[in-house]
Structure formats: C-alpha cells, structure tokens
Image (cartoon, rainbow, N blue to C red):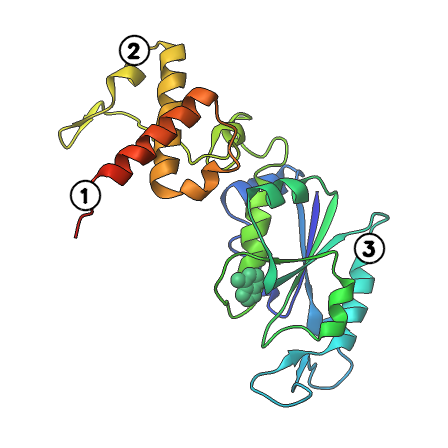
Amino acid sequence: MIVDVLTIFPEMFEGPMSTSMIGLARERGLLEFRTHDLRDWTSDRHRTTDDSPYGGGPGMVMKPEPLGRAIEAIQDLDDEHAHTVFLTPSGRRFDQSTAEELSAHDRVLFVCGRYEGFDARTLSLADEELSIGDYVLTGGELAAMVVTDAVARLLPGVLGHEDSAVDESFSTGLLEYPQYTRPAVWQDIEVPEVLRNGDHAKIEAWRRRKAVELTLARRPDLLEHAELTSEENAWIEREKDHADSQPEED
Ligand code: ADE
C-alpha cells in the first residue's frame, strides 16, 4: 500500500512513521509512506498556504490554489487513483471498520488541514472527510498518523501473528478480553485458573464471556452491532435487569 500525506509539517511524521511496526512495515516494503510539503506548490515569495476568511472572523483558512495543485500532482504520481482523505473535525468519525475499508485501497492520500480549516471549495477534491474524534487538534497531522497506524497494522504481513488483528477489541464488535502473562501470581493477584489449564475450549468460552462482560460494563453501545448468540443476549438482558433492580449508589 502507498500512503501519501500532504502537510506543511512533514517533519512531524519522521519519528512516528519510522518506529516500531510502521517502520518495519516500510522496511519490508509492505507500506510505502511519503510526505509532501504543501509549500512546494505555493507561488509567492513567502510560500503562503493560508489567508483570512471571507466574511471575517477569527483564524485563517487554507488557500485553495496550492492545495489544488498539490493534490493533482500527487494523484498523478502513480497510475492508480489515490483515495483522497481530508482530515477535519467535521469529517465522518474514524473507527475500526473505516480502518478496514481504507486498508483495501492500494493508494491513500491524507490531506492535513491547519488553521481554521479548508476552503469549502476544495472539499470536492476529497473522496471522504474523516475525524478521529470529537475534539479539535491544531492540525490534521496527528490524525493522519493515527489513521495510518490503524490501517497499516491491518496490511497482510505487518503484524507478526496473523490472528492478532482478528480477536482484538472492535474487530469482533466487542472490547478485548483481559490478557495475562507470567508470573502466575503478581502482588498477590493470581492469573485466572482456567487460563493455566490448557483446555482450549474452556479458555475460548471464558474469553468470550469476559469480552461480553467488559463491553457491557464499559461500552454498552457497542453491543447493538456485535454478533451475539441468543444465550449471550439472554445473559445480557438478565444482567441489565439485575442492575436496574439494584438501589442506586450515591
Ligand atoms: N484536525 C483537527 N482536529 C481533527 C480531528 N479531531 N480529526 C481529524 N482531523 C482534525
């Protein structure tokens, strides 16, 4: 997969995109990652990328001309169309299923906004607009890195263990079950007996139940879309009834 990023701060990407799994994925040729400095497509002496908003108001807006020229040029780098994603807090909320969708593209171009945002006319150049959450960052760069990280780890061969991405939080629609490693006792807390007995069917059942329990406790909204057995649904209903019948704590 080829990931291009258009930004006025290419240096922000150097450390995070060269370290750990992403760095390895690049070394192994599974991910090609390129940054492009938006200032290279400006035409004035000061290499200006922003201007004040029509109609007044605080902050600055990304100028459309350099952005348009840059996107066209980057699109033309390879034969394939780069699926073009603008990072903005007004975009669709990024989640694991969006990461899966993006990982199916051969090329993705992330366009990072700064200042108060993009000139609205340039949004037509985007195939989609994504937000990484309901908060406002100083720019799209950190968001582009978050999305690249979540997408790159889904590419075949990037994770050491191919099953790692199958069981984990969100891919099953549930939060991940608790994990333990040696020692068997730490600060007087024992690793659950079932995990030490080598009975794989029992381990599976225990993990599944823990995943459902944790999701019910922390992210009940996820249960609406999770694939649950009728037994699990019945158990959840009983748990909810039980919680409703408990007196409220102050
Ligand atoms: N740019 C600024 N805030 C952002 C957010 N939450 N997601 C994506 N891009 C952004």
Residue 76, horizontal then vertical, whole percent: 84, 57
- Callout 2 amino acid: Asn
| Residue mark closest to the camera, 1 vs 2 | 1
Distance in Å between CA atoms under marks 1 and 3: 64 Å
Drawn side of residue 234 relative to residue 72, left or right: left
Residue at image coords 51%, 55%: 15
Residue 94, horizontal then vertical, whole percent: 57, 51
Q: Does the Cβ of the disc 1 residue fall within 8 Å of ligand 1?
A: no
Distance in Å between CA atoms under marks 3 and 2: 55 Å
- Image quarter of the N terminus: top right
Drawn side of residue 134 relative to residue 30, left or right: left
Q: Which residue is mark 2?
A: 197
- Asked if residue 130 is positioned above or below residue 137 in the image, the reply reads above
Q: Earlier in the sequence, mark 3 or mark 2?
A: 3
Q: Which residue is mark 3?
A: 77
Residue at image coords 78%, 59%: 74
- Callout 3 amino acid: Leu
Instruction: Say if mark 1 contacts mark 2, CB within 8 Å.
Output: no
Residue at image coords 33%, 35%: 240
Q: Earlier in the sequence, mark 1 or mark 2?
A: 2
User: Which mark, by number, is residue 247?
Assistant: 1
Q: Earlier in the sequence, mark 1 or mark 3?
A: 3
Q: Residue at the left extreme?
A: 188
Q: How many marks?
A: 3
Residue at image coords 55%, 26%: 162
SS type, badge 2: loop
Residue 42, horizontal then vertical, whole percent: 75, 78
Residue 194 visible in the current orientation? yes
- Callout 1 amino acid: Pro
